Image (tube, helix red, strand yellow):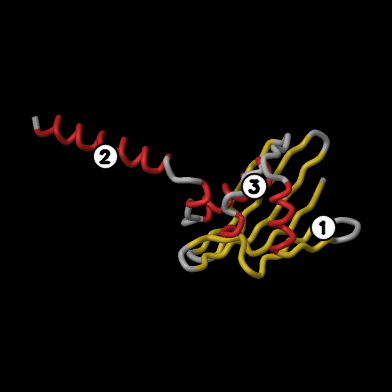
């Protein structure tokens, strides 16, 4: 009988916590892990999800696009660009990999494979006040 009660209580707790997590609005999500910050970034870049942009980037964020002529973009440039892409889904396959993760610092590789070319994005993440943010992005195309 005790086992049945424990099982019922555990099931109820799982159901309640699942419902509570599902009801969190995107703009209220906390980026408490590097993985969550990376997922938020990929969602913004590939699916036009823009709810957490102000939480996602550090104040000194910089993006560099490598090519024949290198381009640099600031935090405000990046946020403005992504807001214009709201709701637009990219036709690509995306893979992510955390290359290195320390308690307050991480480097990740995001690859977006399009028909005929790929975009590789190396991102640097830092933990600020308990939340993970992206501080740098370096892009290359093949």
Q: Name the quadrant containing residue 57.
A: bottom right
Residue shown at 62%/50% (left/top)? 41
Which of marks 2 and 3 precedes in the sequence?
A: 2
Secondary structure of the residue carrying numbered label 3: helix
Which of 106/62 is in front?
62
Which of the labelled discs sits on residue 66, or is there none?
1
Q: Which image quadrant: the C terminus?
A: top right
Residue extending farthest right:
68
As drawn, is 20 to the left or to the right of 100? left
In the rendered view, would you say 20 is above or below 135?
A: above
Specify which label sits upstream in the sequence, 3 or 1.
3
The residue beneath circle 2 is: 13
Q: Is residue 30 left or right of residue 40?
A: left
Task: Please rate how many residues cluster around mark 2, counting C-alpha atoms within 10 Å: few if below 14, some from 14 to 19, many from 20.
Answer: few
Q: Which mark is residue 39?
A: none
Quadrant in the rendering for residue 63: bottom right
Left or right? Give the position of 36 relative to 114. Answer: left
Q: CA distance from mark 2 to mark 1?
A: 49 Å
Residue at 60%, 59% (x, y): give it. 54
**Residue identifier under label 3:** 44
Q: CA distance from mark 3 to mark 2?
A: 32 Å
**Quick one: label 3, few (<14), some, or many (20+) residues within 10 Å?**
many
Element under label 2? Answer: helix
Quarter of the view holding residue 72: bottom right
Could you tell me which quadrant the N terminus lies in? top left
CA gap, disc 3 and disc 1:
21 Å
In-front residue for pair 127/108: 127
Q: Residues within 10 Å of mark 1 (few under 14, many from 20)?
A: few
Residue closest to the eye, 14 or 52: 52
User: x and y percent of residue 11 in the render?
Assistant: 26, 34
Q: Position of residue 59 (x, y in %)?
A: 63, 69
Name the element at disc 1: loop
């Amino acid at each position: 009988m005790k086992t049945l009660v424990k099982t019922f209580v555990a099931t109820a707790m799982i159901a309640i916590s699942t419902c509570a997590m599902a009801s969190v609005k995107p703009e209220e999500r906390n980026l408490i892990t590097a993985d969550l910050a990376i997922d938020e970034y990929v969602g913004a870049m590939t699916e036009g999800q823009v709810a957490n942009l102000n939480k996602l980037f550090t104040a000194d964020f910089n993006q560099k696009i490598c090519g024949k002529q290198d381009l640099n973009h600031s935090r405000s440039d990046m946020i403005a660009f992504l807001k214009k892409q709201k709701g637009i889904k990219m036709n690509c396959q995306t893979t992510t990999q955390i290359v290195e993760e320390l308690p307050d610092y991480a480097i990740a590789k995001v690859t977006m494979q399009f028909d005929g070319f790929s975009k590789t994005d190396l991102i640097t993440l830092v933990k600020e006040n308990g939340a993970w943010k992206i501080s740098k992005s370096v892009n290359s195309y093949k």
